[in-house]
Image (cartoon, grey):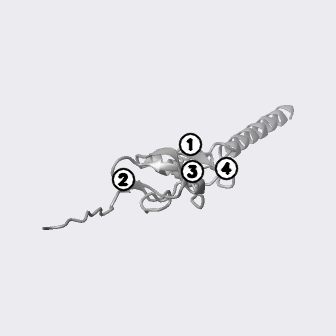
Amino acid sequence: MKVQYIIAILVLVIILAVASYVYVQNQQFLGGDRDAHGCIGSAGYSWCEAKSKCIRIWEENCTETVDQACTNSGGTVTTALCCKSSNDFPNTCLIGACGCSPENSRTVKMCDCGEGKCFNGNTCIVENFAVTTATTTT
């Protein structure tokens, strides 16, 4: 009789051990759900293509900054004097943003796209200014 109790207890212990092992194997633990970029979704992280990193969208926006847009399109972030009403990174494809006198100007960030290009607020593009000169015939 005593042997039967011992066998029954051993069988019960084995069944509980197997059940516990199966339960643990089916659980998803915090941090165990990394995506293809290594972001941990259960911790609130998701991949931000614009910043090339994992972020929590309630902590930072997933948008490319104007500085990044400038450098990603081949430009260099610089500073210049522009009209006081101008914000950082004025559209240099338009004429006038930086054409004020020094006393009516302030220093702003700009994107220098190089010779023959301008920054339209999003990217460096080829300038399309038609420069004409007056000619006279005699």
Please give the residue where the numbered disc 3 appears in the rendered image: 108
Label 2: element kind: strand
Image quarter (top left, top right, bottom left or bottom right) of the N terminus: top right
Instruction: Tell me the CA gap for discs 2 and 1.
Output: 38 Å
Instruction: Tell me the CA gap for discs 2 and 3.
Output: 19 Å
| 41 with respect to 113 (left or right) | right
Q: Earlier in the sequence, mark 2 or mark 4?
A: 4
Query: Label 3 crowding class (10 Å Cα cut-off): few <14, some 14-19, many 20+?
Result: some
Q: Amino acid at mark 1?
A: Gly
Please give the residue where the numbered disc 4 appears in the rendered image: 42
Query: In percent of the image, x 73 and y 42: which residue is there?
Result: 20
Q: Amino acid at mark 4?
A: Ser
Query: Label 4 crowding class (10 Å Cα cut-off): few <14, some 14-19, many 20+?
Result: some
Instruction: Tell me the CA gap for discs 2 and 4.
Output: 45 Å
Q: Between tags 1 and 3, which lies in front? A: 3
Q: Earlier in the sequence, mark 1 or mark 3?
A: 1
Please give the residue where the numbered disc 1 appears in the rendered image: 38
| 60 with respect to 17 (left or right) | left
Instruction: Tell me the CA gap for discs 3 and 4.
Output: 41 Å
Q: Amino acid at mark 2?
A: Lys
